Amino acid sequence: MNFLERLQNNRNALGLLFMLPAAVLLLLFLTYPLGLGFWLGFTDAKVGRDGVWIGLENYQYLWGDAVTRLALFNTLFYTFVASVIKFGLGLWLAMLLNRNIRFKTFFRAVILLPYIVPTALSAIAFWWIYDAQFSIISWMLVKMGLIDKYIDFLGEPWNARLSVIAANIWRGIPFVAITLLAGLQTISPSYYEASAIDGASRWQQFRYVTLPLLTPIIAVVMTFSVLFTFTDFQLIYVITRGGPLNATHLMATLSFQRAISGGALGEGAAISIAMVPFLLAAIMFSYYGLQRRAWQQGGADK
Amino acid sequence: MSANNASSSTDTVGMSYLDTPSRKFVTIYLPLIVFLIVLLFPFYWMAITSVKPDNELLSRTGNPFWVIAPTIAHFKKLLFNTSYPAWMWNTVLVSVVATFVSLVCSVFAAYAIERLRFKGSKQVGLSIFLAYLVPPSILFIPLAAIVYQLGLFDTRWALILTYPTFLIPFSTWLLMGYFRSIPYELEECALIDGANRWQILTKIVLPLAVPGLISAGIFAFTLSWNEFIYALTFVSSSEVKTVPVGVVTELVEGDVYHWGALMAGALLGSLPVAFIYSFFVEYYVSGLTGSVKE
């Protein structure tokens, strides 16, 4: 046998060869930067200057830095509020779409649009909707007689926080709704029929049939949702750039400002790395969800 | 996945005969329509603003929801007085090449993990899933340093080579699911008939996985079209910017916002993905749900 034939019959060699292109790209541009990020977080690297090891100094500085603390608070607040509302509205929308309705495919296709188009571009539309002088929301509220002065959406800290959260919810609902809809479609209608015969109300059907069967997929979907919300960058960067008075800075936008705009690579990397523990917690949660799903479908109980 | 969707359309009829038309309207259609209006309003607003002349944009009288004298001045300005066409071309180029590269890598990787079952393929599969969960916003700072060291800073290659870091894990994960659904027996038959691995992959597995390839391709294309943070960080000259970055960084001049041109830019940048998406909705949805389902 020549070399080629032997290669073809060797699983390990062939497997290695097939994995090579993906592995090279991922190791060079994903694993290596991840490690480099950890290293940079312990150095005082600046743009154009290799840093030296300074231990935990970056983290100590950031811990005492009021802006970083505010960004951490903002990130947690933004993630928590946006995720809870996205889940509630997304589940509701998924259940509406799961009913026997007309134009179902049309509704489903159109509802995904906010998720399809570039977020940076729809964020510009929100920026315009939130404009202090020409906001369409203020215009409508004034015409309805609910307010007499235009709302300064992006100029007041709490207004700005809630405005960007609303934009994030708008963007995230389609993802939650469509993925949960896929989960709902796997629930057999005979459960609902059986529970109806036993006299269950709609609420009881939801509470004791839908929710338990949907829990595993909810865990996975919400993990993804939390992950993307926690590390969000585009919406904030485009709508507020972290302002007013850093009231909407998230960890990601702050790390961009410090590392790329400000040139302090080490400090920026430390901020990004500080997000990792939170992400790991989310991933563990997802793993738990996947395990439970496998168990529910008759897989081994681990 | 598609089988699920097909059967469910008949399944959900279930107990809906209990609903009276008026009750159905209030509990289903009314909330649905409200959802629809809220989700679509920003697009309507984008479109109507992009054709409004400046004097209508900046007046508080009249009905802002409609336009009296539509104009294409903003689009003209965008196409002839800015680098917008170049950004568009860059976005197309980068998205197509990055998607293609990622798909090729993913097909090989997914086939190896799912079917060659080399030593450690389980662990590799798991690490692909973990790679999928690493968000770009914690990678961009060290990646910027690497891109700079490699001399790729401010080139299209910087984007083409870094986009696969989020495209490959996703597409591989999706394709693994598709390959898993192809019966082993088909491959064994081919082996007995004297086909080699390459022939099995190209003549048996790939033709059967075409829906998966389309799903992964559409998804990867929209992800690269929409990418923002890498394009913002790794590129600084106007000629190599992508549409999202170009619109955000160059159409905003000082304190005077040219809302008409901004909205026209946002609309034009959104239309191509929306257009492609409209042809492949089913594939896109199965890609989206497949990515969280397995």
Image (cartoon, coloured by chain):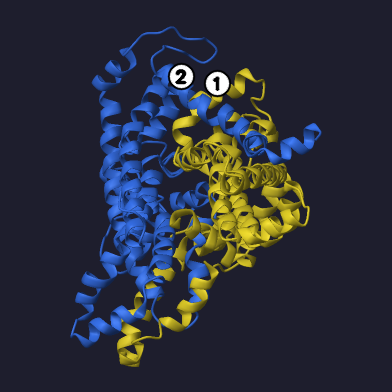
Q: Tell me, yes or no, whether dots 1 and 2 are on the same chain.
A: no
Q: Amino acid at mark 2?
A: Leu
At 22% across and 88% down in the image, what residue appears? A197
Q: Is residue B19 left or right of residue A6?
A: left
Which is nearer the eye, A3 or A214?
A3
Which is nearer the eye, B36 or B97?
B97
Furthest residue in direction front, as rendered: A1
Instruction: Please give the residue where the numbered disc 1 appears in the rendered image.
Output: B145
**Which quadrant of the figure has residue B210?**
bottom right
Provide the secondary structure element on which disc 2 rests. Answer: helix
Chain to which the residue tagged by mark 2 belongs: A
Q: Are marks 1 and 2 in contact (CB under 8 Å)?
A: yes
Q: Position of residue B190 (x, y in %)?
A: 73, 57
Which is nearer the eye, B36 or B167?
B167
Colour chain A is painted in: blue
Chain to which the residue tagged by mark 1 belongs: B
Instruction: Please give the residue where the numbered disc 2 appears in the rendered image.
Output: A265
The answer to whether residue B13 of the structure is visible from this angle is yes
Q: Position of residue B87 (x, y in %)?
A: 68, 42
